[in-house]
Image (tube, helix red, strand yellow):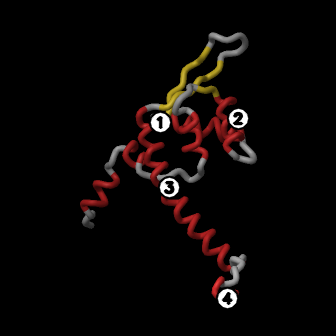
Amino acid sequence: MTTNKNESEKNSQPKEEKVMTTMPKNLMVPVLLLSLRNWNLHGYKLIQELTRFGFSSVDQGNVYRTLRQLEKDDMVKSEWDTTTGGPAKRIYSITDAGEAYLQTCSGALEQYQSIINRFFTLYMDMFLPSIKQPDESEDK
């Protein structure tokens, strides 16, 4: 049985390269990375940011699982903050790999936005045709 050289090269790529060239299955990942772009935040604050961004319902467990996966993928890092009163909080920050992935997501989302804009233009034209203004030449 022969193996296609390109196929075996694809399978031997480091995990990081595969991760950085794919879009997330949901928008939570790029929003989390964007939220961490300028600030180091703890999980609860990230959940607030998701809500403020427009996510109508946020499963806290899913957010923390996603953050752990992002950490495994070297897109975020975390450390314990014990400087405040009360229990220690895990503070997350974006890594260089996370920055690169965010850039990839941005380009792909821009393409999706273009497709969505075209979709709604066609949709509106089909179901809500524009009201035609009388031609000015007809008044004369």
Q: Which residue is mark 4?
A: 140
Q: Nearer the viewer, residue 76 or 10?
A: 76
Crowding around mark 3 (Cα neighbors within 10 Å: few <14, some 14 to 19, many 20+) is few
Which is in the foreground here, disc 2 or disc 1?
2
Neighbour tally class for label 4: few under 14, some 14-19, many 20 plus, Cα within 10 Å: few
The three-letter amino acid code for the residue at tag 3 is Glu
Q: Residues within 10 Å of mark 2 (few under 14, many from 20)?
A: few
The answer to whether marks 2 and 3 mark residues whose Cβ atoms lie closer than 8 Å is no
Question: Which residue is the site of mark 3?
Answer: 110
Image position, residue 56 (x, y; %): 74, 47
Q: Give the amino acid at mark 2.
A: Gln
Whole-percent x and y of residue 135? 65, 84
Report the front residue among 133 and 47: 133
Residue holding disc 2: 48
Left or right? Give the position of 34 relative to 88. Answer: left
Q: Are marks 1 and 3 in contact (CB under 8 Å)?
A: no
Disc 2 and disc 1: Cα gap in Å?
20 Å
Q: Nearer the viewer, mark 1 or mark 3?
A: 3
- Where residue 69 appears, as percent x and y from the top left, is 54, 38
Sooner in the amino-acid sequence: mark 1 or mark 4: 1
Q: Residue 60, how many percent across, how many down?
A: 71, 37
The residue to which callout 1 is attached is 75
Q: Amino acid at mark 1?
A: Met
Task: Check the image and report above or below for 112 versus 121.
Answer: above
Helix, strand or loop for disc 1: loop
